[in-house]
Image (tube, helix red, strand yellow):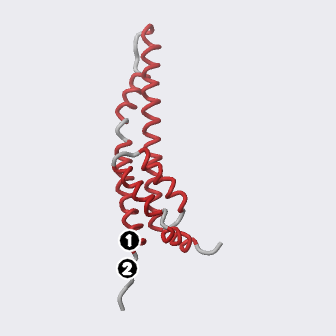
Amino acid sequence: MTAQPDPDGDHLRILSICHYVVGGLMTLCACAPVLHFAFGLFMLFSPVKPDETAPQRFAGGFVALIAGAAILAGWALAGCVLAAGRFLSQRRRYNFCLVVAVFEASACSPLGTVLGVFTIFVLVRPSVKALFEQARGPL
């Protein structure tokens, strides 16, 4: 008895692994502004002469705020990509996976763009959508 090939399942498994890899790389890249964040905090809290305090503290706070926002946004997007990888392997949360794929395709170049486009191509197949509905079970 020969096992039937399951191309949709194989594609979902490969996409899941690729989401884990890209999510890890995104997490690592999102740590790049840490030096800017530290420099901004140093400018904000370093002792200076009283007449030079306002411009330096403002600039330091601004740099720290922008760098901190970039770090948090990168980590949030990376977390969503990692979660989408998990959900693809479990064949759960179809809409979440599709939305993350659209964000990847539009905002995370170049690897995220390629992965997002391939994920969209796979997820829009009726047979793949049926796999997600089958895994969800009856309501």
Q: Earlier in the sequence, mark 2 or mark 1?
A: 2
Relative to 14, residue 101 above or below = above
Hey, what amino acid is under mark 1?
A: Asp
Quadrant position of the N terminus in the picture: bottom left
Q: Residue furthest toward the top? A: 51
* Quadrant of the image occupied by residue 14: bottom left
Q: How many marks?
A: 2
Label pair 2/1, CB-CB below 8 angstroms:
yes
Q: Residue furthest toward the bottom? A: 1
Residue 132 makes an appearance in the image? yes
The 10 Å Cα crowd at callout 2, few under 14, some 14 to 19, many 20 or more, is few
* Disc 1 target residue: 10
The answer to whether 76 appears left or right of 33 in the picture is: right
Q: Look at the numbered disc 1 and give the secondary structure of its residue.
A: helix
- Name the residue nearer the viewer: 62 or 123: 123
- Name the residue nearer the viewer: 113 or 69: 113
Q: Residue at x 49, y 62 (%)?
A: 124
Relative to 47, residue 7 above or below = below
| Residue 5 badge | 2
Q: CA distance from mark 2 to mark 1?
A: 9 Å
Relative to 12, residue 5 above or below = below
Residue 45 makes an appearance in the image? no
| Residue 68 badge | none
